[in-house]
Image (cartoon, rainbow, N blue to C red):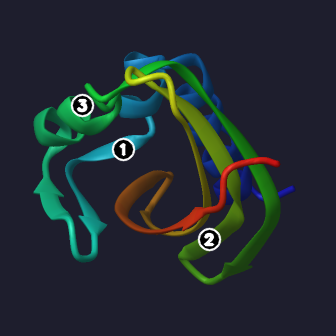
């Protein structure tokens, strides 16, 4: 597995653990996080504030189905779930594109699609 794919795996593990330091260590200082239709963040401090959503409790479940790499970009496709403070469970499919600068993640583009509740 390439260094870039290993970095993306560590990134997701950091989210599974809600480990801010683990995630932030993988990013450039001027990292950009684009969540189309929701928000655009720039810099580690802004990124850090979005790692844990205040509407959720506990750690999310994140499953990577595929990692696709070309040049300085790795795309992760998978599914996730989280427990909302309201008691509802939120399920989603995701596609995250990671752009690297050297060994670090310079940009993350996150696309989320809500999925029906488990039956």
At horizontal 77% and vertical 54% (from top left) the residue drawn is: 64
**Which label sits in the foreground, 2 or 3?**
3
- x and y percentages locating residue 109 in the rendered image: 39, 70
| Label 3 to label 1: alpha-carbon separation | 11 Å
The foreground one among 34 and 118 is 118
The foreground one among 40 and 91 is 91
Q: Secondary structure at mark 3?
A: helix
Say whether marks 2 and 1 touch (CB < 8 Å): no
- x and y percentages locating residue 68 in the rendered image: 75, 76
Q: Which residue is mark 2?
A: 74
For this view, does 82 lie left or right of residue 4? left
Q: Residues within 10 Å of mark 1 (few under 14, many from 20)?
A: many
Q: Give the mark, 2 or 3, whose residue is nearer the N terminus.
A: 3
At horizontal 52% and vertical 32% (from top left) the residue drawn is: 88
For this view, does 115 lie left or right of residue 108? right
Q: Which residue is mark 3?
A: 48
Q: Give the mark, 2 or 1, whose residue is nearer the N terminus.
A: 1
Q: Which residue is mark 1?
A: 27
């Amino acid at each position: 597995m390439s260094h870039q794919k290993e970095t993306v795996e560590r990134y997701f593990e950091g989210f599974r653990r809600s480990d801010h330091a683990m995630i932030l260590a993988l990013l450039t200082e001027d990292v950009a996080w684009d969540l189309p239709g929701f928000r655009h963040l720039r810099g580690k401090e802004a990124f850090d504030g979005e790692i844990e959503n205040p509407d959720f409790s506990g750690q999310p479940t994140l499953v990577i189905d595929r990692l696709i790499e070309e040049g300085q970009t790795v795309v992760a496709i998978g599914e996730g779930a989280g427990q909302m403070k309201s008691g509802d469970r939120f399920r989603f499919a995701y596609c995250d594109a990671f752009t690297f600068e050297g060994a670090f993640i310079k940009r993350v583009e996150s696309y989320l699609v809500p999925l029906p509740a488990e039956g």
